[in-house]
Image (cartoon, grey):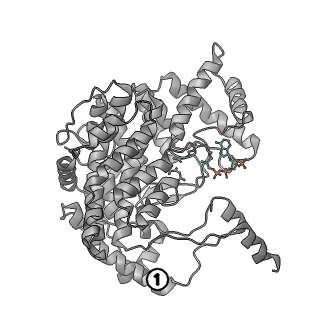
Amino acid sequence: MIAFARHAVRAAAARQYVPMVTSSLAAARAGPIASARWFAASAAEQDLKAAFAAKVPAMTADIKEIKEKFGDQVLGTCTVTQAYGGMRSVKAMTYETSLLDSEEGIRFRGYTIPECQELLPRAPGGLEPLPEALFWLLLTGDIPTTAQIESLQQDLAARSKLPAGVTDVLDATPAGLHPMSQLTTGLLALQQDSLMAREYAKGTTKNLYWEHTLEDALNLIARMPEVAARVYRKTFKGGKYIPSKAGELDLSANYAHMMGFDSPSFADLMRLYLCIHSDHEGGNVSAHTVRLVGSALSDAYYSVAAGMCGLAGPLHGLANQEVLNWLIGMRKALGDLPMNEENLTKICWDTLNSGKVIPGFGHAVLRKTDPRYMCQREFALKHLPDDEMFKLVSLLYEVVPKVLTEQGKVKNPYPNVDAHSGVLLQYYGLTEQSYYTVLFGVSRAMGTCASLVWDRALMLPLERPKSVTTGWIKNHFANK
Ligand SMILES: CC(=O)SCCNC(=O)CCNC(=O)[C@H](O)C(C)(C)COP(=O)(O)OP(=O)(O)OC[C@H]1O[C@@H](n2cnc3c(N)ncnc32)[C@H](O)[C@@H]1OP(=O)(O)O
Ligand SMILES: O=C([O-])CC(=O)C(=O)O
């Protein structure tokens, strides 16, 4: 099913993870980025579970040593303003699968998006990395080999059949229900098969939680595309479903096929899309929700469904839908007027003056243009350079930062991932913008599931930070 990306073997062979427990000095010398990477030790393991299991002891020992050595060090503090301000930049959690730098953007296990595009295995004829390969990387820290990804793809295909009753639940949802509500309902219907829930009820032991969670994660990832495609066909195509070709096509191409899109370049867009939306460190609303809910030992289905409810908010994943609505409204507002800087500037100010945010711009952590925006822009320059909507998005890239900077409120006036995704989908005929966050959800499930497996492997405890009332703050600081 796949062709191997350039340099992957060389890169995998050249890299080796250095656990702190054996060589903390070497890791420290390697610098923060290199020491954050999990380097491939061997390409021999073809089974994801075995590859993951091999990583757990060193990581567990590493964390034990870190806690012994640095357990009393202060990682972050929280001012009163931060407590009222969404805890912005408070360092109060760990998260292994990805790390966000405010200037540089996301790194998946230490690898930037261009590095992933270069190193991860691709589909035959495809130019973009396979999300199955990104999932392997997020989970194990290693760039997978062709054989490993073929084995994972076969495993996912074998798991992909929806259990009885799931399609009935989806069919019973009202046609007007938002696609994100339908997706979440579908995930909860999948929960009937949770191994974690079943084994916990039987009295399984703590050291096996990760195995049950990995099983649930793999089943969820394998089945979610069909659930999501059914939501699309039911809502927008009169319930005319297209049978799965799991096993014949890779996960992204099959998802596109089940939605009704069979062009090779749309499949490649799906691969890129599902890779870049998967993970964005641990503090974002969806990932943190998955972590929090999972910490109560709710299984992967409950945890991801909860995360999807957060992703459905307009300040988070739903912003991709909002961007398209805004762009369409903008074209209408322009009418016969030329699409130029002056006219777009006026429309931006109208949006701000009406009390709304400009969707797709700004970020809670990033302070530069999101690299996920940039790689979608590069995709557009390659595949749809003359598209009118792309030209509009390109012009807004120049206009909006100036307007937001002049307004003087935002910490980051530059575009995020959601500013670009919709125009690419529109170009290929996926024009129903209320569906866009579902695509984001299918991707985010992969990153958050990888992290959830680690949460259980590392036996992270129940999350329960302390809260205080405003009265408590007044009394506490009054006499200081
Ligand atoms: C996948 C993702 O989740 S990426 C983000 C997707 N969301 C969006 O694109 C929605 C538009 N953007 C926003 O609303 C914000 O930039 C957020 C929610 C992403 C980040 O919020 P914050 O960290 O609070 O941003 P910041 O500190 O810059 O906010 C300061 C002020 O600028 C405002 N602001 C931030 N971004 C924007 C924007 N795009 N348009 C207008 N005003 C904005 C905030 O609402 C806030 O106003 P207030 O002081 O009146 O409450
Ligand atoms: O990091 C964030 O807060 C939001 C975001 O871009 C994401 O979750 O992809």
Taking the view exactly as shown, the residue that stands out farthest to the right is 479
Percent from the top left, x then y, of residue 339?
A: 63, 21
Considering depth in this image, is 439 or 248 the residue closer to the camera?
A: 439
Q: Which residue is mark 1?
A: 67
The quadrant the C terminus occupies is bottom right
Percent from the top left, x then y, of residue 272?
A: 38, 42
Considering depth in this image, is 300 or 274 the residue closer to the camera?
A: 300
Q: Is residue 463 left or right of residue 331?
A: left
Taking the view exactly as shown, the residue that stands out farthest to the top is 336
Which residue: 52% across, 22% down? 388
Taking the view exactly as shown, the residue that stands out farthest to the bottom is 68
Above-or-below relation of 67 to 178: below
Above-or-below relation of 403 to 261: below
Percent from the top left, x then y, of residue 86?
A: 63, 59
Check mark 1 vs ligand 2: CB closer than 8 Å? yes or no: no
Which residue: 50% across, 50% down? 310
Q: Amino acid at mark 1?
A: Lys
Q: Quick check: can you spot residue 62?
A: yes
Q: Which quarter of the picture shows residue 479?
A: bottom right
Percent from the top left, x then y, of residue 189?
A: 32, 48
Helix, strand or loop at label 1? It is helix
Q: Quick check: can you spot residue 38?
A: no
Which residue: 35% across, 50% down? 188
Considering depth in this image, is 222 or 47 the residue closer to the camera?
A: 222
Q: Is residue 204 left or right of residue 187?
A: left
